Amino acid sequence: MIGASTRAVLLFLLVVAGAGAARAAQAPLVADLSEHLVAITTGFAGADVLLFGATDAEGDVVVVVRGPSRPTRLHRKGRVLGIWTNTASMNFARAPSFYAVAASRSLEELVGKPELDRHEIGLEHLKLDVPRGIASENVIERWRSAFIRTHEVAQLYQSDVGRVVFLGNRLFRAEFHLPANVPTGSYQVQVFLIRDQRVQSAQTTPLIVSKIGVQAEVFDFAHQRSALYGAIAIVVALFAGWLGNAVFRKA
Amino acid sequence: MQIYLPIAEMSVDVFLLLMLGGGVGFLSGLFGVGGGFLMTPLLIFIGIPPAVAVATEANQIVASSVSGVLAHWRRGNVDFRMGGILTIGGFVGSSLGVLLFSFLRDIGQIDLVIRLSYVFFLGIIGVLMLVESLRAMRRRWVPAGTGRQKLHKHTWVHGLPLKMRFHRSKLYISALLPLAIGFLVGILAAIMGVGGGFIMVPAMIYLLGMPTVVVVGTSLFQIIFVTANVTFLQAYANQTVDIVLALLLLTGAVIGAQLGAKAGAKLHGEQLRGLLALMVLGVCGKLLFDLLAMPAEIYSIGIGHG
């Protein structure tokens, strides 16, 4: 894995160096991923994704990885007759299912709050679609921070800002870890070039996380042809039970 | 070695699952219990979403019940007529149970209901088993005089309409009673991911008055149909049956059950029964503690519908 990525980076560096400054001058920022498809296979236990690129001159780089947005419900427990149970819930109409940031310097040093808010860089600046007008501002804020906290615990949101490493002045790389429970779908990897406290240029690269192989087929089958899946599950169990009994009798 | 479970959408250690299946299978072989009431909470403890644990366990129980019923069938210990009536009740009950399950999941209360049902039933069964095994142990020291018991007691139950004759069980009772029992156990089977043998067996003995020899076979017989119904409906309505998980548990369980049955022939019954009772109470206590203790995080991400 690492060998392949390193080779990819080297190849890319060669291409960038070879293609010359002319192309880089036209595009202030060029970046790509070592792979655009993360395959969830039988042995999947998480994956590392490598991003590399070049800038046309000195500057800082911030990378944001966002999972597909989806409606999500958050529950809150309360005590009822001594038992902790879900007593309240809040629907977030649109929230990224995965979120991680990497930067070449600390975010506060790089840009001001308005820019961070505008581009949703950093968990504190992430826009979560909370229904307005149904609760007071500080109640909403409590739900918002709980939403982020629970996603952090599930490793779906990464609170630690990762590092974008510069190799020389213009070439950079950054690495992301996707945990084993990573949601499937179409991800967006946004790369921002920052100079003089402002976002100068941005580029978005897609990343697909998808189940591949037997599990993908089982999952699709279970969802698309549920009745047949259920029937097969029963037949398999009946056969396994008979087999177990047959083996047991011989033994 | 990790394996990614396609429906549970998480990766779990293969050997952990095989050992879980084997361990619970061993106990079920040893004591002749279904094992679902231990397996489902254990799956929840290792982080399988409760909805997937319950539905997948139903699938696994189909297999273990088939395995068990074949042996009883050969010895002629299955009352098919009674089993059929119980199955009819069980079909209706378990279908209603799956509907209830989907509804509870949508309003975010399924976890609570599953846990509460387990605390309630495991608590009762654990205590009863413990008392029974302590009494049995004491009886070995102080032999008590056994009085003659009546074969049947006449109660209001015998006044119900729709009487049917059950030859194998030597009973002439109203079909409404087994229908009702099948119905109630069916609901529990769907919500708890169990076969329900641990309720069905005492109900058959004490409520229906069936002879002990046909009880286990007949219970297993109807469990096959009820859990098959639950498997189908859960797969169809909620897509929560994880066939990979079921197969792994099953493999362990088949091997474990063989070893358990062999070990059971050599070991002291009462002490083991006491041990199983303590285990059941332990699982019950852990579930109860989780419900009563202040959770580290009172917020949680909803499952299923957003």
Image (cartoon, helix red, strand yellow):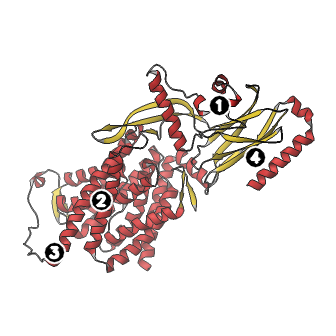
Question: In the picture provided, is B215 more to the left or to the right than B147?
Answer: right
Which residue is identified by label 2?
B281
Query: What chain does mark 4 sit on?
Result: A
Residue B268's disc is none
Query: What chain does mark 1 sit on?
Result: A
Mark 1 surroundings: few (<14), some (14-19) or many (≥20) residues within 10 A: many
B129 above or below B175? below
Which residue is identified by label 3?
B139
Mark 4 surroundings: few (<14), some (14-19) or many (≥20) residues within 10 A: some
Query: What chain does mark 2 sit on?
Result: B
Query: What chain does mark 3 sit on?
Result: B
- Residues at circles 4 and 1 in contact by the CB criterion of under 8 Å: no
- Give residue A109's quadrant in the image: top right
- Labels 3 and 2: the sequence-earlier one: 3
Mark 2 surroundings: few (<14), some (14-19) or many (≥20) residues within 10 A: many
Question: In the picture provided, is B198 more to the left or to the right than B137?
Answer: right
**Foreground: disc 2 or disc 1:** 1
Image point (77%, 51%), residue name: A5
Q: CA distance from mark 2 to mark 1?
A: 50 Å
Give the residue type that dot 2 points to.
Answer: Leu
Give the residue type that dot 4 points to.
Answer: Ser
Q: CA distance from mark 4 to mark 3?
A: 73 Å
A139 above or below B159? above
Give the residue type that dot 1 points to.
Answer: Ile
Which residue is identified by label 4?
A34
A230 above or below A156? below
Kindly indicate whether the residues beneath marks 4 and 2 are on one polypeptide chain.
no
Residue A121's disc is 1
